[in-house]
Image (cartoon, helix red, strand yellow):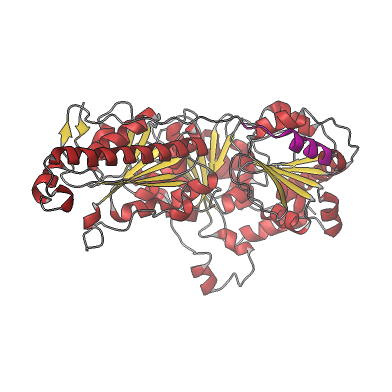
Amino acid sequence: MKYPKIPLAQTVIQLCKTKNIKHIVISPGSRNAPLTIGFTHDDFFTCYSIVDERCAAFFALGIAQQIQKPVAVVCSSGSALLNYYPAIAEAFYSNTPLVVLSADRPKHLIGIGDGQTINQENVYENHILYSANLKQDIKEENSFVQNEELPIFKNLENKLEKFLGLQQGIQLQNEKEINEALNIAIYKSGPVHINIPFDEPLYETVDTLTVKPKVVEVTLKPNKMEDLLVSKLVSDWYDAKRKMVVVGVNKPNSIAQKWLDELADDESVVVFTETTSNIHHPYFFNSIDKIIAPLDVEGFKALQPDILITFGGLIVSKKVKAFLRTYKPKQHWHIGTEKANDTFFCLEHSIKMAPNLFFEQFLNEVKHLTKSDYQDYWKAVKKERKKKHTAYFENIAFSDLKAFKSILKSIPDHTVLQLSNSSTIRYAQLFNINKTLEVYCNRGTSGIDGSTSTAVGCAVANTKQTIFITGDLSFFYDSNALWNNYIPTNFRIIVINNEGGGIFRILPGDKNSENFDTFFETKHHLSAKHLSTMYGFTYESATNLEELQSVLSSFYSEGESPKILEVFTPRTANDTVLLNYFKAIR
């Protein structure tokens, strides 16, 4: 087997291997050649070559999202690692484990005008769990020839002994930093950055390893609430007649059905879920905006909880955030090992436990003694909203809203559904989602910039079919995601093309002016057809409901290539249809 000659490269690669980091996404470059050589010559690793670093990082994020283990991204020096930043921020806020391995220039070449050289140390400072800035190996030949006059070597009879001591100190320090970074990525589930300086020559190899780095393991203590806290929570629970649970982004199958049933059986509890919650129960409220949007002051007061429990990641619904910030609960408990956000400005308890463990400890102490009509009242409201929802669709014209109804209903059981941000995720929130689907969306920073790349990474990392629904701006923005040799043939993309950022049309402002069209809605006449041809996708399109339903009947079936379906909807009608929807369900 070939190994890079540079000891530091060997150390990084061996420690990634011992920590079981198998997926390595590499963007071609020269300075990162020692890492590329090491990873690609070892069959333990599955390596991917993605040229565009922004796409590469989101592709890695999609893999990590599925396997729930760190994925490494490897790049050259200079602006390359800056292109990782959007995905790093997403990983930071969505608790997704990524390991950035950035090659760097030696210190003496930084700040003197060399090409592809920036200040790389701590470059992700505000959006990273750990930054490991490694030290460059000392090269023996340089120490004795070029550095003969350095003070550390003057008047030393045994220069070799001094050299070995310095190199050993650097090696131990580097091992410590790499272990720390990788352990944090694994156990705290987030992004870390390892910056690795390499001097030339970069392409030399050896047949045997010259270093054997020490592996540092982590001992985890089991999380358990103190008896005093449990007692207080149980007491407050009994005193509250109205309890609300709001679930944000949540991994599929992560909450035991037993605890969901317990919550549903408590008549004083209302559970609001979102499309990205991946939680289902007939008594739960899976379309928050459909319940909240039509409420008046009396309705808000009737819904205001005494206790609010949240778990999972960030919440999509702006309406529920506005409601709970205005009609605050007396207490807000957040359950989860990740950072607790004081989203509603009333956070009382941040309980650092996995939700399953919390419910096991807490609900076993709770009996359903509180008499309340809270859940029954809102179930009646939900039933009425459902009737009006159904009635509204009988007479509306073809639009984004009507297209989403047909698309979401058509998706086959047991597939993975990736949703892009902005209008796509918000439209999806208005419908009942097939409970067999696994739903994902980049809700850490909620940007449109890497949705397609993430979906591609997701499709590569699992054996199920992945279906990606996106808006036109999000799709074109990240079109380099299709410049990828790993896309499986069962991958499907559905692009809702309304010729611009249609979501902006529902916001206040003059919607029919050149200024709005150009700088807010970003009106265009682009199509995905030519991209489909260039990247080897089968292309289909629809411009009305009949065409859409006809195409969907066979769109998910097996084929020799991945497929793109482009659905064209009327640019100027979608906002009116959506706004009238909320009027109709009142």
Extreme residue in the right direction: 371
Where 586 falls versus 251 (above or below)? below
Viewer-proximal residue among 202 and 429: 202
Q: Count the labels in the image.
A: 0
The residue at the point 84 percent across, 59 percent down is 297
Viewer-proximal residue among 287 and 24: 24
Q: Whole-percent x and y of residue 102?
A: 32, 47
Viewer-proximal residue among 296 and 244: 244
Q: Whole-percent x and y of residue 67?
A: 48, 32
Residue 258 as seen in the image, left or right of residue 306:
left
| Quarter location, residue 415 | top right
Q: Which residues are magenta?
A: 223-236
Where 561 falls versus 155 (above or below)? above
Most common SS among magenta residues? helix
The residue at the point 25 percent across, 62 percent down is 111
In which quadrant will I find the N terminus? top left
Residue 12 as seen in the image, left or right of residue 237:
left
Q: Whole-percent x and y of residue 214?
A: 34, 30
| Quarter location, residue 13 | top left
